[in-house]
Amino acid sequence: SWYVLSKTLAEEQAWKIAEEAKMDIVTINPAMVIGPLLQPTLNTSAAAILKLID
């Protein structure tokens, strides 16, 4: 997806900038973020969790 691509490119750029500036950098890539839904419809991730619980 475009979202995944944009996140990947942004992280690659952050690593490049940090290396050039001789800075340490830490990135965290959670497997899944769980919390209240921001939209009124059930998204794919939430549906998968609901299916496991049900």
Image (cartoon, grey):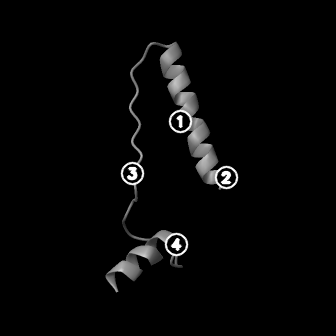
The three-letter code of the residue at mark 2 reads Trp
> Rounded to the nearest whole Å, what is the CA distance between mark 3 and mark 2?
18 Å
Alpha-carbon span between mark 2 and mark 1: 14 Å
Circle 2: element type: helix
Q: Where's residue 19, x and y in %?
A: 49, 17
Residues packed near mark 3 inside 10 Å, few (<14), some (14 to 19) or many (20 plus): few
Report the residue marked by disc 1: 11
Name the residue beneath numbered marker 3: 30
The span from disc 2 to disc 4 (Cα, nearest Å) is 16 Å
Q: Amino acid at mark 1?
A: Glu
Q: Residue at x 49, y 13 (%)?
A: 21
Q: Quadrant of the N terminus?
A: bottom right
Asked where in the image residue 6 lies, by quadrant, the reply is: top right
Earlier residue among tags 4 and 3 = 3
User: Which of the labelled discs sits on residue 44, or is there none?
Assistant: 4
The amino acid sitting under disc 3 is Pro
Q: Are marks 1 and 3 in contact (CB under 8 Å)?
A: no
Tell me which amino acid carries mark 4: Thr
- Say the numbered circle drawn on residue 51: none
Given contact means CB atoms under 8 Å apart, are the residues at marks 4 and 3 in contact?
Answer: no
| Residue under label 2 | 2
Image coordinates for residue 51, horizontal then vertical, percent:
40, 81
